Image (tube, coloured by chain):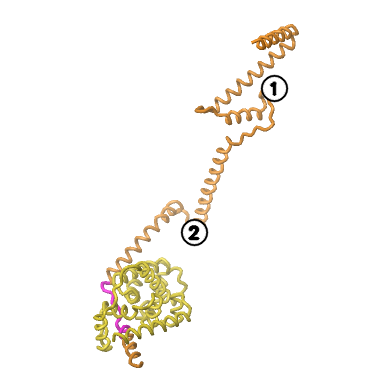
Chain colours: A orange, B yellow
Amino acid sequence: MTDDRNKYDRMIKLLRKSGPVLHDPETLEGKIMDEILKQEAGKERPQSILNYLFGWVYIGWMRRGLIAISVAAILIFIFQQSVILRRINAIGKQAAVSGTVFSSEPLQDIDQKQLLMKLTVRMPVKGMTLSGKEIHSLIRSYDELQTKYMDLLKVIEDDPELKQYIERKLTERQKRKFNL
Amino acid sequence: MNLNNLIDPGIINECRNGNMRNFRELVRATSPFIFSVAFRMLGDEERAKDAVQETMITVWDKISSLKSDSAFRIWMYRIVVNKCYDSIRKSRGQPEIKADEKTWAVISDMVSAGEDLQLENNQIASIIKGMAEKLSPKQKTVFILSELEELTCEEISVVTGMSRANIKANLHYARKSIGEQLKRYI
């Protein structure tokens, strides 16, 4: 037992005394420093951009504050832009027609014009796109048509003979249709 | 080789402030020490040199977070041990050359030759490999830190993150296993 213990102790003493030797430490030192310098150069690039932009501010806290404010402003701008874009994209999907009745009055009301616009967007013809200009001209011609129709109705109302004549003609046409 | 005698605390403090010229001094002073620990753990010069390189890079990256220069020695041990664990993990699966009868005969001669003998790196590697053949990486680490680097149980606990009871149990097993190896071959 003691002999075994002695062997162990001798072995440990020998190993403690003979430490491993690093051959050519200069090469290893050079490698380590090169690697660290390379890393530092990589780290310095973003720092130099910040120095270029805010190097004119000499007070540390003021420079940091300016950097923080600019970053915040950029983030707010990006957020705002993304929100606006999302809303613009959603406009086309927002047309909802529920219980709206067209009156015989011309489309002067802005709500009705908007409604017509939405309806136009909701009913796309295959392979055809409508520009804002075209929609405006469509609304204008619809307005004109409405006005002319109203004028015509007024003229008919004012002239009983003409009214009778038109009613007679309409009845005849109806009868002809029925005969066919 | 005691690390505390190798480095001036002023150099460590300068390095904590990002002084690269002082860091070169630190590399020069500590590389042989780190190599010694890594070589004892890995048993291969090239792998030990890689571990030294990685350790020094980590030291440079993290030295600013070091609380005091007095903690430097144990902190350095901790980094180098972790780098050695990484290296062992990477080399897992590669065939390991085991110490044969011939190697043990050479080791026996060395032990018999007495304490005046100065071992070469390859001889140190053979002896440690032969002795620690049956040990797990943890047991080998505890054995090296306790018996060869002469760290206390508390220091080993800080370096490895193991509990004191665990360290004692691992060290007991390592001594027993190495004793059996020596009994069988020498």
Residue A19 falls within the magenta-colored stretch: yes
User: Label 1 amino acid?
Assistant: Glu
In the rendered structure, the answer to whether residue A53 lies left or right of residue A89 reads left
Image location of residue A171, percent across then percent down:
70, 10
Find residue B15 and name its label: none
Question: The disc labelled 2 sits on which kind of residue?
Answer: Gly
At 42% from the left and 76% from the top, the residue drawn is B74
Q: Please determine if labels 2 and 1 lie on a single subunit.
A: yes
Rendered residue at 66%/25% (across/down): A108
Please, is residue B117 above or below residue A128 in the view? below
Is A177 part of what is drawn in magenta?
Answer: no
Q: Which residues are magenta?
A: A14-24
**A123 shown above or below B155:** above
Q: Residue at x 34, y 90 (%)?
A: A4
Quadrant occupied by the C terminus of chain B? bottom left
Indicate which label's residue lies in the foreground, 2 or 1.
1
Q: Earlier in the sequence, mark 2 or mark 1?
A: 2
Q: Nearer the viewer, residue A145 or B172?
A: B172
**What SS does tag 2 mark?**
helix
Dividing the picture into quarters, in which one does residue B89 lie?
bottom left
Which of B7/B170 is in front? B170
The residue at the far bottom in this view is A2
Q: Position of residue A106 (x, y in %)?
A: 67, 22
- Residue matched to label 1: A105
* Predominant SS along the magenta part: loop
The dot on residue A60 is 2
Residue A157: quarter of image? top right
Residue closest to the eye, B29 or B81: B81
Residue B21 appears in the figure? no
Mark 2 packing: few (<14 Cα in 10 Å), some, or many (20+)?
A: few
Count neighbours of disc 1 (C-alpha within 10 A) and say few if under 14, some if 14 to 19, many if 20 or more: few
